[in-house]
Amino acid sequence: MQKPEIIGGLKRAVERGYSLEQAKRSLLNAGYSIEDVDDSADAISGVIGRLPSPEYPILSNSSSLATLPPIPPKQPLVQPQFQQQTQVQPQIKPKKSVSGRKILIIFLIILFIALLGGLISLIIFKDSVIDFINNLSL
């Protein structure tokens, strides 16, 4: 029975340069049944001719394999190694700045002293303040 996932796997393997037999063997090793793999391979056998040709030709008989040069193994991409440069950064001491909290505390202390001075003044000059307020209402 033809299965779309088997057909897709066979097409991808052939596009990557593997022979149809290698692709079939891989799918059999993956657990697919031999009937499904053979039916799917038969279904795409006409499609293989229209696929872009890989680096090496695909041969159906194994007798002519001895005349071909061996396929070189694919080498993994090696990314260049960068040497990490470690530099000792000098310790930067933050500037001592007056924070907003300190400014608020100084402002509140000045306000407290001003209010305390006003209260003391009212206590000392209470008679004069009372006469001044009474004269305003007349």
Image: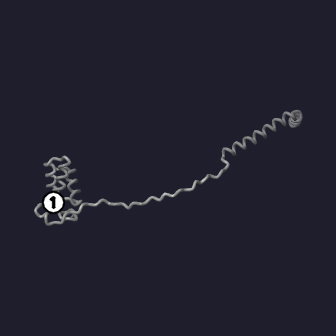
Q: Position of residue 81 (x, y in %)?
A: 39, 60
The residue positioned 26% from the left and 60% from the top of the image is: 74
| Front-most of residues 128 and 20 | 20
The local crowd at label 1, few if under 14, some if 14 to 19, many if 20 or more residues have their Cα within 10 Å, is few
Rendering colour mode: one colour
Q: Mark 1 = which residue?
A: 46
Q: Is residue 118 left or right of residue 93?
A: right
The residue positioned 16% from the left and 66% from the top of the image is: 68
Q: Is residue 105 left or right of residue 116?
A: left
Q: Position of residue 35 (x, y in %)?
A: 13, 48
Q: Is residue 7 left or right of residue 114?
A: left
Classify mark 1: helix, strand or loop.
loop
Instruction: Locate residue 22: give its quadrant.
Output: bottom left
Q: Position of residue 116 (x, y in %)?
A: 79, 37
| Front-most of residues 68 and 27 | 68
The residue positioned 16% from the left and 56% from the top of the image is: 21
Asked if residue 138 can be seen in this view, the reply is no
> Which quadrant is home to the C terminus?
top right
Residue type highlighted by circle 1: Gly
The residue positioned 19% from the left and 46% from the top of the image is: 31
| Front-most of residues 38 and 80 | 80
Q: Is residue 125 left or right of residue 68?
A: right
Asked if residue 108 can be seen in this view, the reply is yes
Q: Position of residue 121 (x, y in %)?
A: 84, 37
